[in-house]
Amino acid sequence: MKTRIKILLTILIVFLLPFTECYAKKDTVSVKLESVKGQISKLTHQMIIEVLIEDREEMKYPLRSGEEIRNVLNEIFNNIEVKNIKKTKREILMDFDNLNCSYFEEKWGYQEYTKTATLYYILLGLLSGYHGSVTYIWDLAEHSLYYSIDNEEDLDWNCYILDSYLTLEMTRIYLSSQTSCNMEEEAYIRCINSFLLKLERYAGYDQIGKRFQKYRNELRLIVDELVRDSKIVFSYEVRDGDGYWALAKHVLYRSGLDEIKSRNPKIINELAAAIEKDLKNNRIGGLETGQVLELRYIDYYLPHMIHDKYKL
């Protein structure tokens, strides 16, 4: 009888072991992603305070309701229920109306208006749930303030509002992490890498290169944490005429760095060579049409490529 019980217990353990390992793996990933969400929340809060509220030396008008805004932001980013949301939003809209009625001139006025308006759009978005955040932070802010941000002809003016624009972009990453219950490692890596690429693009401007260095470093650490020991792979089916360049371009796209290929072709050459070497190490010596390959993020093939080796 005892022997039968031992055999049954052994069979049960062997049967359940894969499931316990699977759940343990999921728990580990969940803990890692919760840590990442917390870091992104802290960093976003810090950027809003430092860039949009405290950096006002060149501003003509004082920030209305500055202390109240700080208190609301503290409650939001510390997961404390904001009381009297309707009253708070009504006051922000009144301040926004006052901003629109103020007189601004030349580039410094353009900077002041954009910085303050960005702060108001972010606040209204954070207080308005998912659909409200899309309206204020994606639609209205994008189309009223930053519709020509990538236009090189407007850079003489836009260089004064890049810090506000990047703070808005960071807030979007924060909101995506908070509102999506199933945001996975790949989505975080794509979002953060894309943001890092924008930081590198604007690093030549003093207000970005110097001031945003600490934000850049913290985001790099988050990506390193996500990629470290990551087992994530994604499939790619080889098409007719594909070479290792095609694989490299796909890896760039999945890593959130698609636009690099038009700005620095050398990276594609190095990435393609690294992919080819890795595949050969895994006994895949060539590419055949219809073949399905497992690829990884760019950080796997070229560690710290964006951070240390290239000035993009």
Image (tube, grey):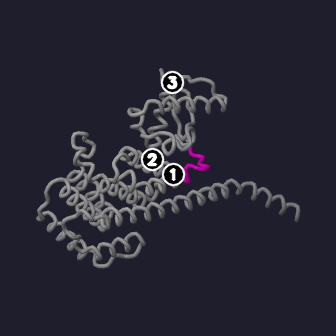
Q: Residues within 10 Å of mark 1 (few under 14, many from 20)?
A: many
The residue sitting at 49% across, 27% down in the picture is: 245
Residue 217 or residue 128, whichever sits in front: 217
Q: Dot 3 corresponds to which residue?
A: 243
| CA distance for labels 3 and 1 | 28 Å
| CA distance for labels 3 and 2 | 25 Å
- Amino acid of disc 3: Gly
From the top left corner, tell me how far across and down residue 247 is, in percent. 50, 31
Query: Which range of residues does the magenta coloring cover?
Result: 222-232
Pointer 3 or 1: first along the chain: 1
Instruction: Evaluate whether residue 1 shows in this view.
Output: no
Q: Residues within 10 Å of mark 3 (few under 14, many from 20)?
A: some
Displayed quadrant of residue 279: top right
The residue sitting at 23% across, 76% down in the picture is: 87
Q: Dot 2 corresponds to which residue?
A: 193
Q: Dot 1 corresponds to which residue?
A: 223
